[in-house]
Image (cartoon, helix red, strand yellow):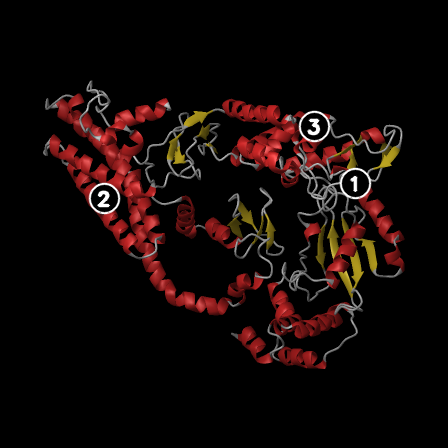
Amino acid sequence: MDSDIEMDLDSDNDGEYDDDYDYYNTGEDCDVERLDPKRADPEYFEYECLTVEDIEKLLNERVEKLNTILQITPSLAKVLLLEHQWNNLAVVEKYRQDANALLVTARIKPPTVAVTDSASTSAAAASAQLLRLGSCGYKTTASSPPQYRSQMCPVCASSQLGDKFYSLACGHSFCKDCWTIYFETQIFQGISTQIGCMAQMCNVRVPEDLVLTLVTRPVMRDKYQQFAFKDYVKSHPELRFCPGPNCQIIVQSSEISAKRAICKVCHTGFCFRCGMDYHAPTDCQVIKKWLTKCADDSETANYISAHTKDCPKCHICIEKNGGCNHMQCFNCKHDFCWMCLGDWKTHGSEYYECSRYKDNPNIANESVHVQAREALKKYLHYYERWENHSKSLKLEQQTIDRLRQRINSKVMNGSGTWIDWQYLFNAAALLAKCRYTLQYTYPYAYYMDGGSRKNLFEYQQAQLEAEIENLSWKIERAETSDLGDLENQMDIAEKRRTTLLKDFFPVDT
Amino acid sequence: MANMAVSRIKREFKEVMRSEEIVQCSIKIELVNDSWTELRGEIAGPPDTPYEGGKFVLEIKVPETYPFNPPKVRFITRIWHPNISSVTGAICLDILKDNWAAAMTLRTVLLSLQALLAAAEPDDPQDAVVAYQFKDKYDLFLQTAKHWTNAYAGGPHTFPDCDSKIQRLKDMGIDEHDARAVLSKENWNLEKATECLFS
């Protein structure tokens, strides 16, 4: 367990763990919640904040492990792991099942295999092939003796000696200079692990070692390695870059859920799954939709919503600046339909289903127009509440400053010591926490379908809202009301908040 | 401009000039400026297509990073085709986008475009309106495409009915190109076209 979390928990459940009372050895039916933080707190999240070096080490370990099992080069191992979300077991299993298919889907080999390789579905043959792919490098060895025969490069159209030529498993041979310029052009465009062969209709991927053999300019090599590292981290479901400005930290957790991670270096809190601000109980897709909707006022957002969509696979933002509806993601090479965002492969002639709406903008507009007023009203209802809590949160610092002043004057007047009033800060922190959750219940409710579930949720929401108002009121008047009452109120508010979140983060049993 | 781009373009230019297709007058290429960054291509409409008899002019812009990035190609001659924008001339062809490979040449580009004219891909459209007509009202599509070929690319087929409808709209003060575009879009329904223009 991470030490940060422990600390966090301790401060939340002040005192509970400090008791000398031994929970574990009492035969009594004591509070189960206290035994297991996973059950007590639905937001409980185990994670680690790691540096780039830590992650490099971690990824390299995986690569090495695969190397030893499959006897392949690190470069090939990286490609295979990247394609399988760094799941060593999956790679090994697929390799044992059908090594050839594995190499083809990872785009290490071309789909149509040369006749001599037709027997390579057996693991042994494939293994031999992997070894060959990895060990002898990428020098073209087809013609003999290659180094004396001059060959023409189809890209630069110049004739050179055979030993200047390199090719991938597909056998397409190009001269060293062309490969190098090509790699640099691709790296310049931010492409690293997805660089493909230069031949027409060939999608065989260029592994890291060939790129690093040929690209010698240190700037370009660094860039390549940075981009590749980003690709590796992004393809790893258990890793997430800290979204803090200029922060190099990468958060790791084996629990892939929309829980809050807090960077130990820059203290940015964010959702582990999507990297945005923590947003429970709203889920990642919904909050993105909501935030885009809320930002509608700005021209940029208008432009983004009018001209861009997110890749359905890797969620990178794509601007369509021309061309047809058959899109291929620049980042992950996923083919999809721009209109419906469905997979292009399964799309076929359904195109018309997608274009119908666009084809008749007038008809669509008319019906939308009628609904628009009602929709706007609904939106504003939720938006006002969302914005209200957001503003209250921003004023939190002022509230705490005011609190400090008030406590100061109390202490000066001799009513209690500084320590006596500390509980007020705890109360203020809890208030902020509850407000934060409450704020994020509104986008969730906005996109929720009507029905009993929504009724229940809105009931819980109203309860939390009421308790928060009570808490806020009691903090304002803390000096006159008694401590027990305030603590009771804190407990109630936190319980309401937890109840609401429990539905969102189902606790493992 | 990068050396390789220039030397490649020079070479490809010669390749086109020497090709059989030039002899048959089915493709043509010429320089627009001395820096080899912009060329003008021309392809003949393939036989047995509505584009037969037409000459289609293309704008070809060669990027600095050629041949590692594709040339930017667009139709200057207006054309009615599912994969080519009837408004801008933008082309939807995989080899001009993600499937470009450094080993391809100007000649393969021109021939691929010619092949595109012969075999449209309505499921992968650039112009949804044209694609819809292609799939839904193929006869009307053929007529419209022939009419456009006649009007803009010197094709042989004339359609007096189309011309008279365009004239009607012109009489109302509509620009000829706009009139043709709207009528084509509205499947040559004069009433609908008028409504679309004046509503």
Q: What label sits on residue A464 in the rendered view? A: 2
* Relative height, residue B29 to residue B86 (above, below): above
Tell me the residue at 24%/47% (across/down).
Answer: A460
Tell me the residue at 38%/29% (across/down).
Answer: A46
Q: Name the residue under label 1.
A: A155
Tell me the residue at 79%/64% (across/down).
Answer: B46
Across and down, in percent, residue B89 comes to 68, 60
**Which residue type does callout 2 highlight?**
Leu
Residue at mark 3 to residue at mark 2: CA–CA distance: 62 Å
Across and down, in percent, residue A53 comes to 52, 22
Position of the N terminus of chain A by quadrant? top left
Q: Which of marks 1 and 2 is nearer the N terminus?
A: 1
Using a 10 Å C-alpha cutoff, classify the residue at mark 2 as few (fewer than 14 neighbours), some (14 to 19) or many (20 or more).
Answer: many
**Which residue type does callout 3 highlight?**
Leu
Q: Classify residue B159 as left or right of residue A106.
A: right
Q: Mark 3 points at which residue?
A: A131
- Pick the front one: A114 or A210: A114
SS at mark 2? Answer: helix
Q: Which chain carries label 1?
A: A
Position of the C terminus of chain A by quadrant? top left
SS at mark 3? Answer: helix
- Pick the front one: A460 or B146: A460
- Pick the front one: A277 or A105: A105
Across and down, in percent, residue A445 comes to 32, 51
Residue A163 visible? The answer is yes
Question: Is there one chain holding both mark 3 and mark 2?
Answer: yes
| Foreground disc of the pair 3, 2 | 3
Q: Which chain carries label 3?
A: A
Residue placed furthest toward the top:
A20
Residue at mark 1 to residue at mark 2: CA–CA distance: 67 Å
